[in-house]
Image: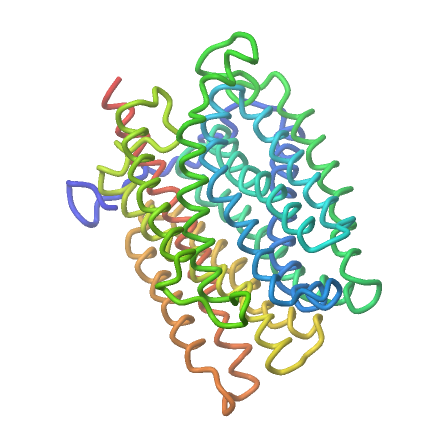
Amino acid sequence: MPTSEGETQPLLSPRNDKQHYNLANLPPLRFWLLCLSIWTGTFLSALDGTIIATLLTPIGSSFNASNQVQWLGTSYLLAVCVFTPIYGRLADIAGRRAAHITAFGFFTLGTIGCAIAPSMGFLIAARALAGIGGGGINTVGVIIITDLVDLRRRGMFQGYANIFFGVGAALGGPVGGWISDTIGWRGAFWVQPPFLIVAGIGVWVNAKRTKPIDQPPIQDGKWITKVKQIDWAGLVLLIVGVGSLLLAMSYKTSSQTSSGEEYKWSNPLIYGLLLTSFFTTILFILTEHYISTNPILPLSLLSRRTPLGVAISNFFMTLSQFSLLYNVPLYFSTVHLDSSSVAGAHLLPNSIMICFGSLFVGWIMRRTGRYWYLTLACGGLIVLTCVALCTWGEGTQGWMTWIHVAPGGFGYAGVLTTSLVGLMSDVTREGKGEQ
C-alpha cells in the first residue's frame, strides 16, 4: 500500500494537530453522542457474535438438534456477506442515517426472533435476519465516521471503534455463558434489544440534518425511485452463489445422509451445489461488469493494487478471526466439557488484545502517517495465533490455551485499522485525480 514515490513515503497528509477532526462542524456534545451511538452498535454486534458462539451447545441440547447448530453461524455470516455491499449503495441512495437505522431495525428484529424461537429452523432464520442488519451496522458506522473525521485521525477513531468491538467480544463469551447457565440461553438475546433501540435513536436524532449523513448524495426523489437504483440482479446472484458454496461446505463437513453416512464429494447434492455456485458467480461478475449501472461490487476497484490487497487480507483475516470466535468456545464445551461461561471466558485474551492493538496502531498512525510495516507485523501475529491453535491437543498446558489466542486479537485490530485507512487514502487520492 505504499505510494509510487517510495516505500517510506507517508500516504497520510502532514500532521496538523490544529485541524479539527469534526468535519461536519457539529456541536461537541452532539458529535460525541453520535459517535457513541455508532460504537454502541459495534459493541452489540461483537457481543452478539461471541454470545452465540458460547450458546451453541445449550441451544443444540434444547432443541435436540446438535447436528444443526453450525447453521446458526452459517446463516448469520451468509446474510452478512451478501447484504453488507448493499448498505454501501443504500447509504449513497437514501443517506447514511436511513441506511444505519435500517440495519439497526433488521438486527433488532432478528435478535428478538432468536429470543422467541420455537424451533431450530426458526432460530436459524432469525439469525439470518440478524445478519442482514449486523453487517450494515458496522459498515454504515464506518462510512459515517469517515464522513465526520479527517483522514489522519481516522485511524484513531477506528481504534476507538475497535475498542468497543473488543470489549463487546470480550464480554459476549463469559456474560453469555453466565446468562445461559443461570436463566437460560434465551436471556442472552433478550438483553440486547433495549440497547439496540437506544443506540438507534441516538443515531437518528444526532445525525438529523447533518450533511452528508442525512442527505442522499446521489439524487433525491421518491423512495421507489431510489429502491430501483439498487442492484437487485447482482444481489440475487450473490445470494445464490455464496449460499450454494456455504451449503455445499456445510453439508460436506457437518451433515450426514439419510442413511447416516457422511456426504462425499461425488454426492449429487454436493457437486450440484458447487457447480451452481461456480456458474452463478460467473454470472454475477458479468452482470456487475456489463449490465448493472450501480453495481454493489464495482469490479474496477479490484483492478487496483491497494483495494485488491485490502480485500485479500481482510478475507483471510476475517476467516481466521471468526473461526477462532466460533471454534474455541465449542472446543472447550465439547472436548473439555466445560460450562458455557468457562468456554466463553477463553476468548477474553483475544478480545482484550483487540483493544490494545487498536489504541497502539491508531496512535502510531496518527504520529507517523505510516502503516505499511504495521500491517505486515500485525498480519504476522494473526498467523502466529493460527499456528499455535493447530498445536492444541491432549498434552497442551492450560495456560497455553489462554496465551495462544492473544496475538491474533492484536493483529486483527491492527490490520483492520491500517487496511481501512490505506483503502480510504487510496480511494480519496484516486477520486481527486479523476475530478
User: Of residues 343 and 255, which is closer to you in this image?
Assistant: 255
State whether residue 199 is above or below residue 416. Answer: above
- Residue at 37 percent across and 22 percent down: it is 294
Q: Position of residue 49 (x, y in %)?
A: 60, 55
Toward the front, the furthest residue is 259
In the figure, is residue 329 to the left or right of 316?
Answer: right
Q: Position of residue 218 (x, y in %)?
A: 44, 15
In the figure, is residue 351 to the left or right of 319?
Answer: right
Toward the bottom, the furthest residue is 395
In the figure, is residue 5 to the left or right of 101?
Answer: left
User: Of residues 35 and 182, which is closer to you in this image?
Assistant: 182
- Residue at 47 percent across and 31 percent down: it is 86
- Residue at 69 percent across and 33 percent down: it is 200
User: Of residues 431 and 196, which is closer to you in this image?
Assistant: 196
State whether residue 193 is above or below residue 284. Answer: below
- Residue at 47 percent across and 44 percent down: it is 81
State whether residue 231 is above or below residue 239. Answer: above
Q: Position of residue 93 (x, y in %)?
A: 49, 19
